[in-house]
Image (cartoon, rainbow, N blue to C red):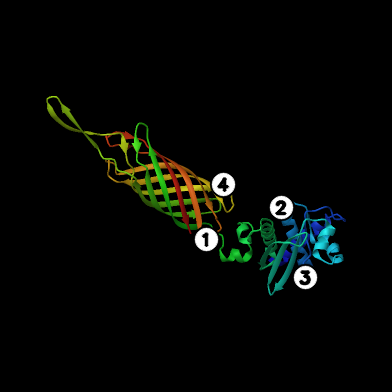
């Protein structure tokens, strides 16, 4: 029943497109020629060309002649270049369709009007339901001159690809990320720190939950400076010069969530969360908690391996001790980069 409904939808789309066509061809930029070789039914073969023409027009924003409007020119011309000249187009696309069992192999090749090869795209349809998705990807591949995998989105996967990797309610992404941490507080200085964390993301269509754990290491450990004082009566001893300096280092974790701003392969996101920490006992602190907000991006979301980066601002919820015993609330800026699979 699904195949029958799909065929009816394709035929209806084709008939609507044909009913709106003028009787004479208008000036156009590119022509989609009728399929050269095909063992499909005439209706299915016509649908392939018409859907490809509609998709190419939508992607390129150009005037496109569909196969129906090119039939007479191709039939009366001795060459495809001659047909292109008679139609007054700058480029043309030759197509072929071949049914092999339940599969349909579709090939589309783009040429300039003088016959110069530009690009070719080839895809296999497993059912008639694949035709809209294949038309969209082949049109993008021909126009941008890239492989059809590079223009695949979550909205134009074919049935076989959907069966190989179905979209689940949530998808686990395991990975690692590293970062540079810049703590700061009024009237105090902190050493910059670096970190490495194991990261787990439970990704849904438009948002993900994130859990991470790892280590943060300060880039320097400031020692107390000893100042020796001499008087006219003789040596008076040394004192320790405690300074308004602090360090951040130890075990760190993350619990947060982020929202994807777009649904594409390269998706920016914004999020919030908490950062619990067990600190090195440098200045008397053993634990801390920060709240953060972040902006970042992930790409490509449809691939098995994904890369992501984010910028984060965090505010300490517990005061931190400095070397001189003074306590401050810290603000922390972080830049992360990582990958997951």
Tell me the CA gap for discs 4 and 1: 21 Å
Proximity of marks 3 and 1: CB atoms separated by less than 8 Å: no
> At numbered mark 2, what does the secondary structure look like: helix, strand or loop?
helix
> Which mark, residue 287?
none
Classed neighbour count for the residue bearing mark 4: other residues with Cα under 10 Å, few (<14), some (14–19), many (≥20): few
Residue 13: x, y in percent? 76, 58
Identify the residue under disc 3: 41
> Which mark, residue 261?
4
N-term mark: 3 or 1: 3
The mark closer to the camera, 3 or 1, is 1
Identify the residue under disc 2: 60
Q: Quadrant of the N terminus?
A: bottom right
> At numbered mark 3, what does the secondary structure look like: helix, strand or loop?
loop
Identify the residue under disc 1: 304
Q: Quadrant of residue 300?
A: bottom right
> At numbered mark 4, what does the secondary structure look like: helix, strand or loop?
loop
112 up-or-down from 224: above or below = below
Tell me the CA gap for discs 3 and 2: 29 Å
N-term mark: 4 or 1: 4
The mark closer to the camera, 2 or 1, is 2
188 up-or-down from 125: above or below = above
Residue 340: x, y in percent? 47, 57
Residue 218: x, y in percent? 34, 45
Tell me the CA gap for discs 3 and 4: 43 Å
Residue 8 visible, this orientation: no
N-term mark: 2 or 1: 2
Instruction: Depth check: give the residue in front, 84 or 341.
Output: 84
């Amino acid at each position: 029943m699904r195949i029958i409904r799909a065929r009816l939808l394709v035929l209806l789309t084709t008939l609507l497109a044909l009913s709106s066509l003028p009787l004479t061809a208008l000036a156009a930029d590119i022509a989609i020629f009728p399929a050269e070789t095909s063992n499909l039914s005439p209706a299915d073969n016509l649908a392939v060309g018409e859907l490809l023409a509609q998709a190419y027009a939508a992607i390129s924003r150009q005037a496109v002649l569909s196969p129906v409007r090119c039939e007479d020119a191709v039939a009366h011309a001795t060459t495809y270049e001659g047909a292109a000249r008679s139609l007054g187009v700058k480029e043309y696309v030759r197509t072929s369709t071949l049914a092999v069992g339940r599969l349909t192999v579709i090939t589309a090749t783009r040429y300039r009007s003088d016959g110069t090869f530009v690009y070719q795209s080839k895809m296999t349809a497993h059912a008639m339901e694949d035709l809209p998705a294949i038309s969209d990807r082949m049109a993008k591949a021909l126009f941008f001159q890239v492989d059809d995998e590079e223009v695949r989105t979550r909205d134009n996967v074919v049935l076989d690809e959907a069966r190989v990797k179905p979209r689940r309610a949530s998808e686990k992404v395991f990975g690692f990320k590293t970062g540079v941490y810049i703590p700061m507080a009024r009237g105090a200085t902190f050493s910059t720190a670096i970190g490495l964390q194991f990261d787990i993301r439970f990704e849904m269509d438009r948002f993900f939950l994130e859990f991470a754990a790892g280590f943060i290491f300060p880039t320097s450990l400031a020692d107390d400076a000893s100042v020796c004082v001499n008087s006219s009566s003789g040596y008076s001893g040394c004192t320790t010069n405690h300074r308004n300096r602090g360090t951040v280092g130890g075990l760190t974790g993350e619990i947060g969530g982020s929202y994807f701003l777009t649904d594409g392969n390269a998706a920016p996101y914004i999020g919030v969360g908490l950062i619990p920490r067990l600190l090195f006992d440098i200045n008397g602190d053993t634990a801390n908690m920060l709240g953060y907000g972040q902006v970042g991006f992930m790409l490509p979301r449809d691939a098995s391996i994904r890369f992501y980066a984010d910028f984060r601002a965090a505010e300490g919820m517990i005061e931190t001790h400095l070397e001189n015993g003074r306590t401050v609330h810290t603000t922390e800026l972080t830049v992360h980069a990582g990958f997951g699979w």
